[in-house]
Amino acid sequence: MENSQRKSRSAGIIGESNRDRGGVLKVEVGDSIPSWTMDRVTPERMKTVAAILRDPTPIHWDRDVTRAIGFDGRLLNQSPINLGYVINMLITWAGPECVRRIRTEFPLPVLDGDCVTAGGVVKAIETQEGVDVAECEVWLDRDDGTRTVQARAWVAIAKEGVTG
């Protein structure tokens, strides 16, 4: 884990604040999902991901381009990375195989230097094929409260203890 990244505000056990003594995640409608923060989005990471994805879009690596389109020379983070921060929050909360489905919108970009925090709330719980699945409203916000990702996620709730 990089220095510029923190897990949820709980200690080392995944979803520790919502688990019983046996490590089983206890979830109710209205529960908040423990937040997950990326302290600083770095341009180096954006450039690396652009290279890996063979993404030639200059808004991820060329400050002159972002200056010309009104972002004061700040680079725009790739949307899949922003979604990854939300997924990190869900996995930290409910385990590595929890995400069943996610429907996402990206209303505004994340810029280099931003601190972003993923959050969420359980909106409904239903049993699908013998597995409890929580439907969650999830998001990624900048420190100033600007919402950069808004999504609906369906998360499987493990019947057994999960530790991280």
Image (cartoon, rainbow, N blue to C red):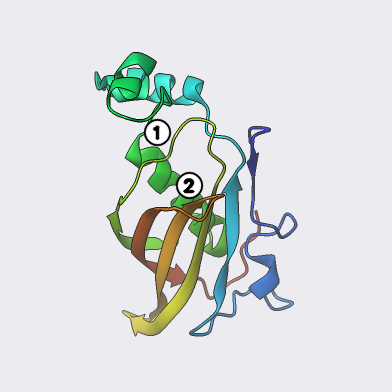
Q: Is residue 128 visible?
A: yes
The answer to whether marks 2 and 1 mark residues whose Cβ atoms lie closer than 8 Å is: no
Rendered residue at 37%/84% (across/down): 126
Q: Secondary structure at mark 2?
A: helix
**Mark 2 crowdedness (10 Å alpha carbons): few <14, some 14-19, many ≥20:** many
Task: Name the residue that disc number 2 marks.
Answer: 85
Task: Name the residue that disc number 1 marks.
Answer: 77
Percent x, y of residue 12: 73, 54
Rendered residue at 51%/50% (across/down): 88
**Mark 1 crowdedness (10 Å alpha carbons): few <14, some 14-19, many ≥20:** many
Q: Measured along the vertical axis of the image, is residue 157 above or below residue 105? A: below
Q: Measured along the vertical axis of the image, is residue 120 above or below residue 61? A: below
Nearest to the observer: residue 42 or residue 65: 65
Upstream in the sequence, badge 2 or badge 1?
1
Q: Secondary structure at mark 1?
A: loop
Percent x, y of residue 112: 48, 30
Q: Quadrant of residue 75?
A: top left
Q: Measured along the vertical axis of the image, is residue 88 above or below residue 154? A: above
Q: Quadrant of residue 147?
A: bottom left
Percent x, y of residue 160: 58, 72
Q: From the image, which quarter does the N terminus lie in?
A: top right
**Horizontal placement of 115 versus 106: left or right?**
right
Tell me the kind of residue under disc 1. Answer: Asn
Nearest to the observer: residue 72 or residue 110: 72
Question: Which dot, 2 or 1, sits closer to the camera?
Answer: 1
Count of marks, rendered view:
2
Tell me the kind of residue under disc 2. Answer: Tyr
Rendered residue at 52%/61% (across/down): 119
Q: Is residue 97 visible?
A: no
